[in-house]
Image (tube, rainbow, N blue to C red):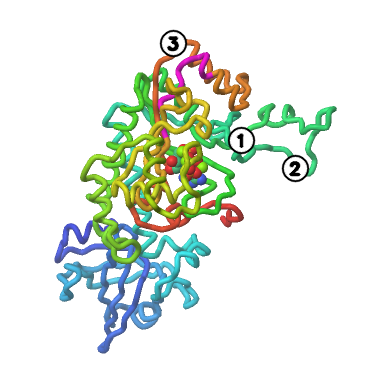
């Protein structure tokens, strides 16, 4: 028999029809006169479906009345119009098949649990309303990412996870090796002999697919990546993970203005998708997690993002009269507190900040004529701060080499990248958006560990 999904049943309200639904019990309530009400959830939507079970079922006493929260079952029965106000339909059960009982020590009984605790049971937390909602929103966002780029003629390119370069030059890489760490082979000079390792060299997990993505943009025009990235950064913040997903479009013959335009359109598109497709889930999160979530998302899509240069932003911060933990000054990188001030207090909108000092930006960002700043942008959003980092890329062969030298990078490690400037170079631009920061924004959750199924952070890799 076909299994019906609860979301579809609520949509169609097929009163009188015989259906079969599967799911997990949220609550069981026994009434007098051999009646029980089961609330079941099948994950397709937030709402529970009410099942009316009674003594005519052959296993009513032996099984149905023993169903605890978390038990799994299949119900066959008839859809009836509901007496209750909340839901239009319920199921009058004709048969209840129990797949698995769930004993009383099932941790997700009725009471609400804190997110810290739920993180310790990441294998079960998907069964809560909050994590169901977050997961469905994450799904909507994933699909909307592909819709957006596909509709604009971008090609989806899969860049490698194991790489031999450090795109960010920040040295936050996880090494990949097949060596037995207790018996590392050494060169005659006593150094670890990576030539004997699997790839014949030192390799790591990617921190960004950008450099490889650029090679495809310089052939296909517009491309994007959407894949996992890894950073061994020891920052125990609510905005950083060791394993996260990144979306990285790269566009040939594009400048920073076009890059900023695409970034803004992109963010609005994916947020609109959530507002349209996840109304119930957004409502739940708005009620229990972040008051005003829906309004703040509507506000983001409603008008243009603010734009300003880094230099202007520093001036605003200096004149703000605000007591920051780290005072903002020209030449130092912005902290989350500064980013949040600009978006939440000064502009009350997302902000696209451009032209940062070259000192703390990556070697591939295009040097401006002032030779002090680069043609880059960070997109900052309320509550979070930086959600996107992007730039016009340095397309000039000589300038790129100079910048690499300044950054202490060896050109031979980036031969493929330099070749792109040697053979038919062209202006191009792109950005990287941390997918989990986007999920944070769209769910109102406060901690990035709670918007990815299995978070990896310093000291935590439980599964
Ligand atoms: P931050 O300043 O927040 O550390 P970043 O400037 O180091 O970020 P980029 O190298 O610009 O990050 O990466 C592009 C995007 O990837 C960021 O704008 C952010 O959305 C996301 N991102 C970066 N690091 C992490 C991380 N450790 N966990 C989750 N997302 C991240
Ligand atoms: Mg960082
Ligand atoms: Mg940054
Ligand atoms: Mg950045």
Magenta span:
390-400
Sequence order check: which comes first, mark 1 or mark 2? 2
Q: Residues within 10 Å of mark 2 (few under 14, many from 20)?
A: few
Residue 155 in the magenta stretch? The answer is: no
Whether tag 1 and tag 2 are in contact, CB under 8 A, the answer is no
Q: Is residue 81 left or right of residue 21?
A: left
Residue 323, located in which quarter of the rendered image? bottom left
Q: Badge 3 is on which residue?
A: 424
Residue drawn where x is 66% and y is 28% of the image = 199
- On the image, the x and y values in percent for residue 113 come to 43, 70
Residue 213, located in which quarter of the rendered image? top left
**Between 448 and 255, the one nearer to me in the picture:** 255
**Between 365 and 133, the one nearer to me in the picture:** 365
Numbered tag placed on residue 397 in the rendering: none
Element marked by disc 2: helix
Q: Residue furthest right?
A: 188
Disc 2 to disc 3, C-alpha distance? 44 Å
Q: Residues within 10 Å of mark 1 (few under 14, many from 20)?
A: some
Q: How many marks?
A: 3
**Between 103 and 435, the one nearer to me in the picture:** 435
- Which quadrant, please, contains the N terminus? bottom left
Residue drawn where x is 53% and y is 32% of the image = 359
Sequence order check: which comes first, mark 3 or mark 1? 1
Numbered tag placed on residue 204 in the rendering: 1
Disc 3 to disc 1, C-alpha distance? 30 Å
Element marked by disc 1: strand
Sequence order check: which comes first, mark 2 or mark 3? 2
Q: Is residue 178 left or right of residue 157?
A: right
Q: Badge 2 is on which residue?
A: 181
Mark 2 close to ligand 1, CB under 8 Å: no
Element marked by disc 3: loop
């Amino acid at each position: 028999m076909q299994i019906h999904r609860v979301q579809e049943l609520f949509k169609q309200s097929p009163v009188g029809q015989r259906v079969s639904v599967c799911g997990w019990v949220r609550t069981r309530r026994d009434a007098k006169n051999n009646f029980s009400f089961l609330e079941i959830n099948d994950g397709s939507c937030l709402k529970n479906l009410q099942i009316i079970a009674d003594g005519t079922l052959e296993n009513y006493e032996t099984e149905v009345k023993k169903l605890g929260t978390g038990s799994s079952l299949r119900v066959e029965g008839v859809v009836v119009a509901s007496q209750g106000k909340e839901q239009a339909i319920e199921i009058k059960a004709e048969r209840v098949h129990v797949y698995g009982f769930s004993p009383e020590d099932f941790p997700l009984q009725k009471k609400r649990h804190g997110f810290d605790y739920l993180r310790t049971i990441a294998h079960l937390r998907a069964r809560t309303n909050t994590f169901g909602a977050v997961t469905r929103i994450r799904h909507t966002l994933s699909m909307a990412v592909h819709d957006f780029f596909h509709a604009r003629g971008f090609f989806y390119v899969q860049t490698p996870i194991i790489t031999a370069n450090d795109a960010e030059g920040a040295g936050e890489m996880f090494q990949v090796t097949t060596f037995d760490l207790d018996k590392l082979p050494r060169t005659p000079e006593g150094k670890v002999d990576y030539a004997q390792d699997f790839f014949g060299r030192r390799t790591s997990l990617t921190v960004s697919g950008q450099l490889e993505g650029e090679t495809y943009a310089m052939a296909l025009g517009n491309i994007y990546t959407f894949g996992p990235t890894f950073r061994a950064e020891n920052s125990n913040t609510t905005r950083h993970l060791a394993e996260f997903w990144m979306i990285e479009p790269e566009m040939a013959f594009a400048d920073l203005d076009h890059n900023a335009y695409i970034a803004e359109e992109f963010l609005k598109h994916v947020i609109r998708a959530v507002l349209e497709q996840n109304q119930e889930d957004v409502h739940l999160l708005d009620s229990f997690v972040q008051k005003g979530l829906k309004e703040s998302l509507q506000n983001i899509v409603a008008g243009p993002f603010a734009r300003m240069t880094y230099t202007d932003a520093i001036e605003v911060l200096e004149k703000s009269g605000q007591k920051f933990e780290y005072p903002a000054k020209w030449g130092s990188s912005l902290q989350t507190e500064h980013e949040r001030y600009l978006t939440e207090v000064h502009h009350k909108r997302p902000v696209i900040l451009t032209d940062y000092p070259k000192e703390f930006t990556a070697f591939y960002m295009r040097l401006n004529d002032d030779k002090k700043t680069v043609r880059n942008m960070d997109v900052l959003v309320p509550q979070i701060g930086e959600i996107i980092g992007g730039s016009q890329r340095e397309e000039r062969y000589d300038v790129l080499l100079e910048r690499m030298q300044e950054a202490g990078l060896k050109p031979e490690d980036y031969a493929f990248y330099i070749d792109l400037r040697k053979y038919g170079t062209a202006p191009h631009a792109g950005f990287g958006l941390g997918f989990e920061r986007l999920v944070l924004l769209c769910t109102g959750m406060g901690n990035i560990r709670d918007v990815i199924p299995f978070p990896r952070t310093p000291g935590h890799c439980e599964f």
